[in-house]
């Protein structure tokens, strides 16, 4: 074997099943990187949105004005804005009817809890995909490798003279599958851990905001 | 619409990243494998000596091999001269001399390792014996025997570069091995055995027929000497 071996050569010479495994892994890797970048941008955007909104919220603005401002663009109320809109909208609807403040607050809390659940689902989107890629692609790669090595040794069995040079290319090309599996899995696992902790942190901020809004509305209901 | 906006940039980034990794990998990979090519292991089996012109009166001449070893290990015919010449004259820095010689020796070995197939060196005597046309033919048969033995020879882990074992091989006209005699042991039983096993495994050698066989291949000496071990 005098020609230099390139990875491309190895992949081309691999058996069909190993090639299929490699294709799956490449697709999984590309997809998981798409998710990683998308989540990254998305979570950064949400973080900025929370910062901006909280700044506005605590600037002493009249909450009714804030709500009216949000209602002007109902189609892209997301994140903390939708949480506020749900809580404050519910409060306004019920408070005008002279109901018991405690009952009103319960409705408000419930409305906000629904909004929170929606937000959590939105933030955590794609994370299960990353977790799946991270935990299964090493196995998929390993499967390709085992299959490739099995074939390499089976071919050796038919030779009269078994040399290392006869097995080595087969093993090498089989190992490419494991390398690809790890290449796909490592970023996915890191991404999953990083993003799920960020989602948790953001959820904490949502919950804290919901509590603060509830207490403000409660005070308002009692004093009114 | 929203989906396109959300995922277009991540998709471009991800594909770009993978393309970059693949490109990088292919460049590096080729660089590392080329350098390994030159270190193909070569086992050294020299067919150092071909039996004397007549095959029958060989027995008395068996006594001759002993003198030959001195010239025969001589795949480097140039080597012996430097040694005696160099030593007496510059006595003061023998150390430097020795190091220089080692250096030369190492370079020579490297060169030999690289030209693999052309490196079986025949005894000078052989050249004298066969002028002209059938020299090429003999060489090609020698090469065949050499590669057949080398293919079967697996050295024990205890083999070292300076070991050498010498065997006398007697063949039948068919090329079958008639007898194999250890002339000079390497001092390592495992090494001797591995060399012997190699010859016995080949069992039948490809040899010419007729006069060329009688002249050169009925009886010859094999020198086993591993030279590619880097220890």
Image: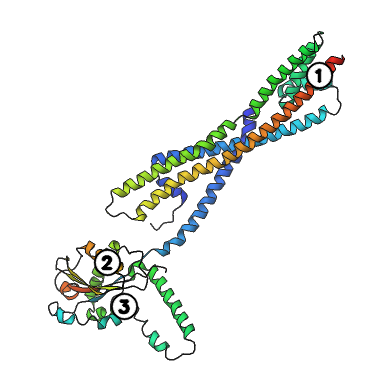
Residue picked out by circle 2: B193
Residue A122 seen in the figure? yes
Residue B9 seen in the figure? no
Where disc 3 sits, the SS reads loop
Above-or-below relation of A155 to A93: below
Position of residue B79 in the picture relative to residue B62 (left or right): right
Total number of numbered labels? 3
Give coordinates of residue B231: x percent, y percent: 42, 69
Q: Which callout, 3 or 2, points to the residue nearer the camera?
A: 2
Residue picked out by circle 3: B73
Mark 3 to mark 1: distance in Å? 104 Å
The chain letter under disc 2 is B
Q: Which callout, 3 or 1, points to the residue nearer the camera?
A: 1
The chain letter under disc 1 is A
Give coordinates of residue A115: x percent, y percent: 69, 21
Mark 1 to mark 2: distance in Å? 97 Å
Give coordinates of residue B180: x percent, y percent: 20, 70
């Amino acid at each position: 074997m005098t020609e230099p071996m390139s990875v491309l050569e190895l992949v081309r010479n691999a058996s069909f099943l190993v090639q299929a495994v490699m294709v799956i892994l490449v697709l999984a890797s590309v997809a998981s990187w798409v998710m990683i970048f998308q989540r990254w941008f998305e979570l950064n955007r949400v973080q900025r949105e929370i910062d901006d909104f909280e700044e506005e919220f605590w600037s002493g603005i009249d909450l009714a004005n804030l709500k009216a401002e949000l209602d002007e663009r109902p189609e892209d109320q997301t994140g903390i804005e939708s949480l506020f809109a749900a809580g404050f909208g519910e409060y306004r609807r019920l408070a005008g009817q002279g109901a018991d403040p405690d009952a009103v607050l319960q409705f408000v809390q419930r409305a906000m809890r629904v909004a929170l659940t929606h937000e959590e689902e939105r933030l955590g989107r794609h994370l299960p995909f990353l977790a799946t890629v991270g935990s299964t692609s090493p196995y998929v790669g390993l499967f390709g490798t085992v299959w490739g090595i099995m074939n390499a040794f089976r071919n050796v069995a038919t030779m009269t003279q078994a040399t290392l040079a006869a097995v080595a290319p087969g093993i090498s090309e089989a190992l490419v599958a494991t390398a690809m599996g790890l290449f796909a899995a490592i970023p996915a696992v890191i991404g999953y851990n990083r993003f799920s902790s960020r989602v948790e942190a953001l959820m904490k901020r949502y919950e804290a905001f919901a509590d603060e809004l509830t207490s403000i509305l409660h005070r308002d209901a009692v004093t009114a | 619409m929203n989906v396109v906006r959300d995922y277009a940039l991540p998709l471009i980034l991800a594909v770009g990243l993978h393309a970059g990794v693949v490109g990088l990998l292919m460049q590096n990979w080729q660089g590392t494998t080329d350098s390994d090519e030159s270190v193909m292991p070569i086992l050294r089996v020299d067919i150092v000596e071909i039996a004397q012109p007549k095959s029958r009166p060989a027995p008395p001449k068996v006594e001759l091999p002993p003198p030959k070893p001195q010239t025969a290990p001589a795949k480097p015919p140039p080597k012996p001269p430097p040694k005696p010449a160099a030593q007496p004259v510059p006595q003061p820095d023998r150390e430097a001399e020795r190091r220089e010689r080692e250096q030369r020796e190492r370079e020579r070995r490297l060169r030999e390792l690289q030209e693999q197939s052309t490196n079986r060196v025949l005894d000078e005597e052989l050249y004298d014996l066969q002028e002209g046309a059938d020299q090429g033919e003999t060489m090609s048969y020698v090469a065949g025997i050499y590669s057949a033995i080398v293919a079967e020879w697996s050295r024990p882990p205890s083999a070292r570069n300076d070991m050498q074992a010498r065997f006398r091989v007697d063949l039948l006209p068919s090329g079958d091995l008639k007898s194999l005699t250890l002339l000079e042991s390497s001092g390592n039983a495992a090494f001797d055995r591995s060399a012997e096993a190699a010859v016995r495994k080949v069992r039948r050698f490809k040899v010419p027929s007729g006069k060329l066989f009688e002249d050169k291949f009925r009886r010859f000496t094999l020198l086993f000497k591993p030279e590619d071990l880097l220890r």
